[in-house]
Amino acid sequence: MKYRIFFAIALLILLLFPLPAWAANPRHVIQLQTTQKCQVCDLTGAYLPVSKLDYSHILASDLSRANLVGSSITFSNLSRANLTEANLSNVNLKRTKMLLTNFTNAILHNTNLTEADLTSSNISESQLANAKLCKTTLPSGLISNRDC
């Protein structure tokens, strides 16, 4: 009986306060944080909130389900990256190239996309509704000056 109660409480705690997801390859996370370069890296579920990743090259990497809340990734290149279900809330992506990037179900609440290049990226208008767009190249190639 005691074990059932303990198990139920432990399960409830894990559901209410989930542990952060770790990347499939921790070496890739360390490589990104130390060199700010990571091509074709497995950063699935990486826990990188409030990271300073300015001037990074994260080309063709898998950042699906990554937590990047509050990070700064300005003047960077995230082209061909997979950001499916990534949390990019309050992330500064100013002047970042994100050509052919997959943003399916990514959270972009208060994300700064000023002068970012989203050419041919998979991102919806509803995802961009709460992001800052100023001189932003949209997936269609058109420039948005909505928040300038």
Image (cartoon, helix red, strand yellow):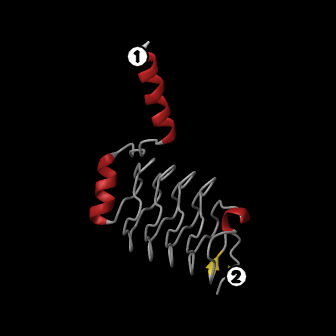
Q: Looking at the image, which residue is at 41% across and 60% down?
A: 49
| Vertical comparison of 131 with 61: above or below | below
The N terminus is located in which quarter? top left
Q: Residues within 10 Å of mark 1 (few under 14, many from 20)?
A: few
Q: Residues within 10 Å of mark 2 (few under 14, many from 20)?
A: few
Q: Which residue is under mark 2?
A: 146
Front-most of 8 and 125?
A: 8
- The amino acid pointed to by label 1 is Tyr
Residue farthest along the top direction in this orientation: 1
- The amino acid pointed to by label 2 is Arg
Q: Looking at the image, which residue is at 63% across and 53% down?
A: 105
**144 to the left or right of 14:** right
| Vertical comparison of 7 with 85: above or below | above
The picture places residue 34, in percent across and down from the top left corner, at: 27, 63
The C terminus is located in which quarter? bottom right
The picture places residue 135, in percent across and down from the top left corner, at: 62, 84
**99 to the left or right of 31:** right
Which is more foreground, mark 1 or mark 2? 1
Q: Looking at the image, which residue is at 43% across and 71% down?
A: 72
